[in-house]
Amino acid sequence: MSTTVYLVDDDEAIRDALGWLLQSRGLECHSHESAEAFLTAWSPTLSGCLLLDIRMNGMSGLQLFDKLLELGNRLPVIFLTGHGDVPMAVSALKKGAFDFVEKPFDDNELVNRVLEAIACDTQRRASDASSDSLKGRIDSLTTRERQVMTLILAGKFNKVIADELNISMRTVEVHRANLFEKMGVRTAVELSQLMSGQAHS
């Protein structure tokens, strides 16, 4: 699990205090003094959580958030807001921000939200990896193996599959064994569970 927090705030005192707080809880903190500085360091592979001040000189936190959405950012974003910024923070939540925390914030509450965001990011990445892995397995099937798989998933027996594809039972058995091996399953039931899990992910 990545325990990296990216902090973007133009107030040096807040950067120092938050950096110390996060590191004291075992979290790695990368601080940036502006939205522009973070953008140059951002990449789609970053994992962890982004703590973002809503009001900054230059590009604001909201503008950075919108820009990151355009770039396909999937890092969970927690906004740090002053009291008057709550309506803006709520509108950011509707666009997919993870949460917002009002200043002055309670240290424990902030760290708890950060940990929840990081856990969320870790879970999403694991789900993505599993989905990518399944896609890779499906991509490795031959056209005929895919045809056999479709008919197995439809509940057809080997003899019916052989008739429908106009091939011998033995050939169906070979394709079935190959596709089970490639998909990492032992039975038609396991194959069905694997594919229905993919449909819901």
Image (spheres, rainbow, N blue to C red):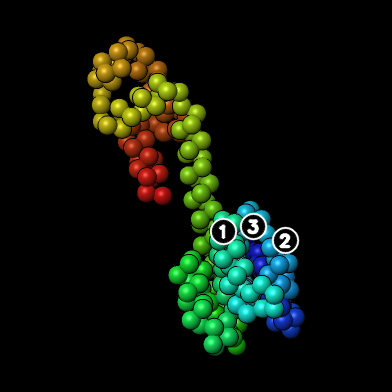
Residue farthest to the front, as pictured: 58
SS for dot 3:
loop
SS for dot 2:
helix
Of circles 3 and 1, the one toward us is 1
Q: Position of residue 44 (x, y in %)?
A: 62, 54
Q: Position of residue 146 (x, y in %)?
A: 39, 27
Cα separation between marks 2 and 1: 15 Å
Which residue does the numbered mark 3 point to in the structure image?
A: 46
Cα separation between marks 3 and 1: 16 Å
Q: Earlier in the sequence, mark 2 or mark 3?
A: 2
Picture quadrant of residue 103: bottom right
Of circles 2 and 1, the one toward us is 1
Q: Label 3 is placed on what type of residue?
A: Leu
Q: Position of residue 19 (x, y in %)?
A: 71, 75
Q: Earlier in the sequence, mark 3 or mark 1?
A: 3
Is there any visible trace of residue 166 in the rendered image? yes
Cα separation between marks 2 and 3: 13 Å
Q: Earlier in the sequence, mark 2 or mark 1?
A: 2
Relative placement, left or right, of 171 versus 86 is left
Picture quadrant of residue 94: bottom left
Q: Label 2 is placed on what type of residue?
A: Thr
Q: Residue at x 68, y 59 (%)?
A: 42
Which residue does the numbered mark 2 point to in the structure image?
A: 40
Which residue does the numbered mark 1 point to in the structure image?
A: 70
Is there any visible trace of residue 19 in the rendered image? no
Q: Residue at x 55, y 80 (%)?
A: 101
Quarter placement of the N terminus: bottom right
Q: Residues within 10 Å of mark 2 (few under 14, many from 20)?
A: few
Number of marks in the image? 3
Q: Label 1 is placed on what type of residue?
A: Glu
SS for dot 1:
helix
Nearest the viewer among 156 and 54 is 54
